[in-house]
Amino acid sequence: MLKNIFSHFKKSDDERPPAEQLDDNKSGSSASTLNADSIKAIIADLNAASSFFKEAGFIMQQIEITAGQEPKITPQFRQFHELTSEEENHLLSQLDDKAIIKFVIMSLFKSSRLQGLFENTEMELYGIEICITGTPSVKTIFKRDNSPVQVTKATRH
């Protein structure tokens, strides 16, 4: 899915200087690699989508951008409200022309459902990180918020 999305942002060979085309061929770059233009576009899309994230019951707390051989963008979210399946489907139907945002919100919904695995435990959904790169991943973080045991810094005796 992301390969198709990134190919939308990547310039075609006709629009790029020959030197850039050669660099892509040497490095084995594919349409799923983020370039500077696609990073800017994805960040702009994420920032413009705050109302969709709020409607979905999430707030984007921060965005990490990692440069390197395989650049990545990692928005981090917290959930403040759960939606019904009907509300989720209605929201997703509004995002057919916003592929990245639809992917992010679908990932948020799926990750938040993992909370059911921790129903009778002290662990609660703390946050969700979505790594947008050639090989996307989603990290769901559960945290013990109300621990009955006071934890302090360990010391050596």
Image (cartoon, rainbow, N blue to C red):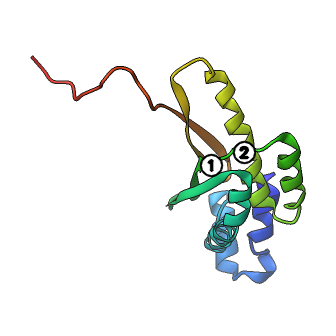
Is residue 88 something one can see in this rendering?
yes
Q: Nearer the viewer, residue 42 or 36?
A: 42
Is residue 31 something one can see in this rendering?
no
Picture coordinates of residue 38, whole percent (x, y): 68, 69
Q: Residues within 10 Å of mark 2 (few under 14, many from 20)?
A: some
Task: Give the numbered dot on residue 130.
Answer: 1
Task: Mark 2 or mark 1: name the one nearer the start of the chain.
Answer: 2
Residue 43 found in image quarter: bottom right
Residue type for callout 1: Ile
Q: Which residue is mark 2?
A: 107
Q: Nearer the viewer, residue 121 or 17?
A: 121
Residue type for callout 2: Ser
Q: Nearer the viewer, residue 155 or 15?
A: 155
> Mark 2 touching mark 1, by CB under 8 A?
yes
Q: Does dot 2 land on a helix, a strand or a loop?
A: helix
Picture coordinates of residue 107, whole percent (x, y): 72, 45
Picture coordinates of residue 63, whole percent (x, y): 53, 60
Q: Is residue 69 above or below residue 127?
A: below
Picture coordinates of residue 81, whole percent (x, y): 67, 46
In this rendering, position of residue 98 left or right of residue 39: right
- Residue at (62%, 47%) from the top-left corner? 80
Residue 93 found in image quarter: bottom right
In this rendering, position of residue 153 left or right of residue 110: left
- Residue at (64%, 78%) from the top-left corner? 19
Q: Is residue 79 above or below residue 71?
A: above
Q: Does dot 1 land on a helix, a strand or a loop?
A: strand
